[in-house]
Amino acid sequence: MFEIKDKQFFMDGKPFSIYSGAVHYFRTLPEYWEDRLLKLKKAGFNTVETYVCWNLHEPSPNEFDFSGILDIERFVKTAEKVGLYCIVRPGPYICAEWDFGGLPAWMLKDKNMQIRCMYPDYIAAVDRFYKELLPRLVPHLHTNGGNIIAMQVENEYGSYGNDKEYLRHIEKLMRDCGADCLLFTSDGNWKNMLSGGSLPDIYKVLNFGSKAKTAFGCMKDFPNDGPNMCGEFWCGWFDHWRDSHHTRNADEVAKEVKDFLDIDASFNFYMFHGGTNFGFTAGANQNPGKGYEPTVTSYDYCALLTEWGDYTPAYHAVRKLLCEKQGIDTGELPPSPKTQSIGRITLNESASLFDNLDNIGEKHRVAVPEGMEYFGQNFGMIYYETELSGKYDMSPLSIKDVHDYAEVYFDGKYKATIDRTLYTLDGKPSIKDIIFKRKKGESTPILMSALDGKRKIGVLTDTTGRVNYGENMLDRKGISDIYIGAQRQMGYDVWCLPLDNLDKLNYSGCDDKSAPCFLKGKFKANGKEDCFVHLDGFTRGCVFVNGFNLGRYWNVGPQKSLYLPGALLKEENEIVVFSMGGYKNPQIEITDKHDLG
């Protein structure tokens, strides 16, 4: 039995400390779950923690998926197999640098939507999801003979709001669904956050990345029956496109862990193994000082295990401390993952995106532009086309609310690029605009030449992640309007392009290297060893191997290659590269080295 008494954790009647590491099942292929979890156990940890990604489990209202990489029950049972307890954080909001903080994009079809509060339609959706999710987890609770010892009520709620009726609703919903285990809230170590995000009678943990010996001082004003615990010890940090790759010295990480051990505090290492934001799942931040900042595909996080599951110096340093503290000998470590170099691959087939709109897109007719969520689209790209007709003088053309990266076309010919990362919240050019855009000689305004007749205006919009934290989370994708001067343009054909059906592409060729296109090639692999796809000479896009979306690439960095898990490989393999913004040569390279910048 796992319980709290006398301000301590007890497991089966004996004092117990939680030494947990975060591993997200949805960021690691199932073929590697046991390996990552065994490495967690061998490092002296006794618990694994994971979030639950609502947006992938319920991709459309009332349609659920708990298969493959989303089989959370299998993940929990695998943890039990290797001897780990489990902490589950079901959200409904998880942040996690994950698209929309794990909330389903279809919520945003409601233009009045209010999240993380008692807004009726939001609450109804949460209720429905929890009633589907929690009965799957209840049999695995420690109270029922399983290994789940605790579950979280919401997530860092004090960083967002203070609706205590909402927090109570989530708590009651979890109890009503059978969550007969320790429930807790987690917030940053600041009174404001604890005041907004905690409940008086629910166990509270703190999230922080340093100074454990003083960080718990803020708890003196908040009654807490349990021992001190850090719900997220941030051992590293995540990366944004255009910024530098984050690293942290192993000795510094070990010192922080020693501080936890010195004061007998429990902790959850965030992240033990970061994994990958496969597909279009990475989120973004948007703050007044920096504007819109999307997260890269890698979730390396400077974690104890690398993105592909290899050991780091910090792993060995932390393992030494934990094993000595507990007087345990974990024996030999599992082997490091093997990697392979495949070499240069020529992409000898091509397909124009615009020639394939009707093959891979779903077409709609609307009066004014709508976001992709309006059409039921969660991820990918969206293309808007409208026809201007009449006599027009030279005029400024403005495209409103580009979320997030757009190429503008006049009669099928490229005209301009709009990049949301180069603008502030109020739409003004940022410092990044000056550094990254104007140095290339690009100008911010789009001028439309005089017209006597007809002109097609096309806007291809690529998403780079919905905001996952803070006040700007209602981040609908696409555009909201096109204006010719002060005149609102009406009447649009819209193609939704989730890029989840590339088997329908017609590879009839695309001679224009600057045009958005798909490039396909084949290669042989040396078994199922991991490798990394390098895209030197390409601008931006995504990569598919044997139909699996490895994620986004972008030459602004810091990430310069994509992780290709060996479990995806066969003897003969197909790779498809979507290119936007142009490329130099139709060749990529697959090596045994990752480049995170």
Image (cartoon, helix red, strand yellow):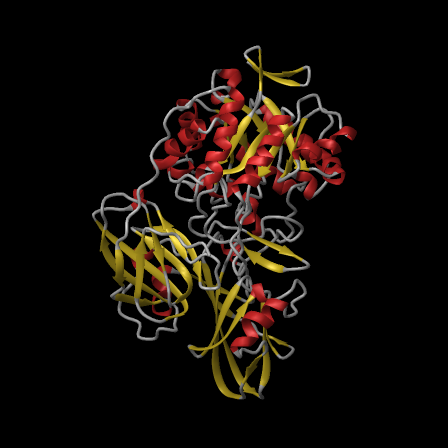
Query: Does residue 488 lie above or below 531 as drawn?
Result: below
Left or right of 141 on screen, residue 263: right
Left or right of 76 on screen, residue 433: right
The residue at the far right in this view is: 221
Query: Does residue 44 lie above or below 242 as drawn?
Result: above
Position in image of residue 194 (x %, y %):
72, 35
User: In which quarter of the view is residue 555 placed?
Assistant: bottom left
Left or right of 580 on screen, residue 374: right
- Name the residue rendered at 49%, 87% in the picture: 453
Left or right of 571 on screen, residue 550: right
- Name the residue rendered at 79%, 30% in the picture: 221
Query: Does residue 62 lie above or below 199 as drawn?
Result: below
The image quadrant where one finds the N terminus is top right
Please name whichever residue, 35 or 514, is drawn nearer the observer in this view of the structure.
35
- Name the residue rendered at 31%, 62% in the picture: 588
Please name whichever residue, 563 or 44, is drawn nearer the observer in this view of the structure.
44
Position in image of residue 292 (x %, y %):
60, 59
Asked if one can make out residue 63 in the rendered structure from this viewpoint, the answer is: no
Position in image of residue 339 (x %, y %):
31, 46
Please name whichever residue, 110 or 396, is drawn nearer the observer in this view of the structure.
396
Asked if one can make out residue 12 in the rendered structure from this viewpoint, the answer is: yes
User: In which quarter of the view is residue 253 placed?
Assistant: top right
